[in-house]
Image (cartoon, grey):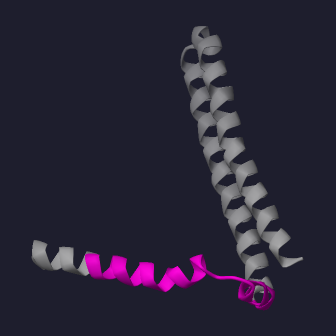
Amino acid sequence: MSHRSTKKLASFLTFLIVTCFASVAFADEGTKMAVAANSGLIALGASLGLGIAALGGALGQGRAAATALDGIARNPGAADKIRGPMILGLALIESLVIYALIVAFLLLGKIG
């Protein structure tokens, strides 16, 4: 595929995406009925999103802790220099999971 045809395809796909989602951007009261009809999908999306975020956060925290403990085991004198950044990293990872929890609550608030 040539560079020119790739640009044309990307332009067409961008146009298609914009035109498909323009109706969602300018929606009015009809969206309340659509939300009610899709409440099961919203609940499923919220629960799957939170589960994936928790899984990713747990994997990230486990890897960060394992790497930090490996570094401390190799050089016990550097424990103080490793512990602070590790705790900061764990807090930032956890904040992303909490952000996913807030988004899940907002999605579930649309159902009720």
Q: Residue at x 19, y 73 (%)?
A: 7
Does the magenta-highlighted stretch encompass residue 46?
no
In the rendered image, the vertical position of residue 14 relative to residue 60, given as above or below: below
Closer-to-camera residue (87/5): 5
Where does residue 79 sit, x and y in percent of width and height? 63, 14
- Report the quarter where the N terminus lies: bottom left
Q: In the displayed structure, would residue 28 be above or below residue 54? A: below
**Pick the front one: 66 or 15:** 15
Describe residue 92's horizontal placement relative to residue 33 as left or right: left
Q: Is residue 88 left or right of residue 3?
A: right
At x 65% / y 42%, what residue is drawn? 93
Residue 4 lies left or right of residue 87; in this view the side is: left
User: Please, is residue 78 above or below residue 26 in the view?
Assistant: above
Q: Residue at x 51, y 80 (%)?
A: 22
Q: Residue 95, image x and y in percent? A: 71, 43
Q: Quadrant of residue 3?
A: bottom left
Q: Which residues are magenta?
A: 11-37
For the stretch drawn in magenta, the main secondary structure is helix
Front one among 3 and 94: 3
Q: Position of residue 100 (x, y in %)?
A: 71, 56
Residue 31's image quarter? bottom right
Residue at the limit of the structure toward the right, as seen here:
112
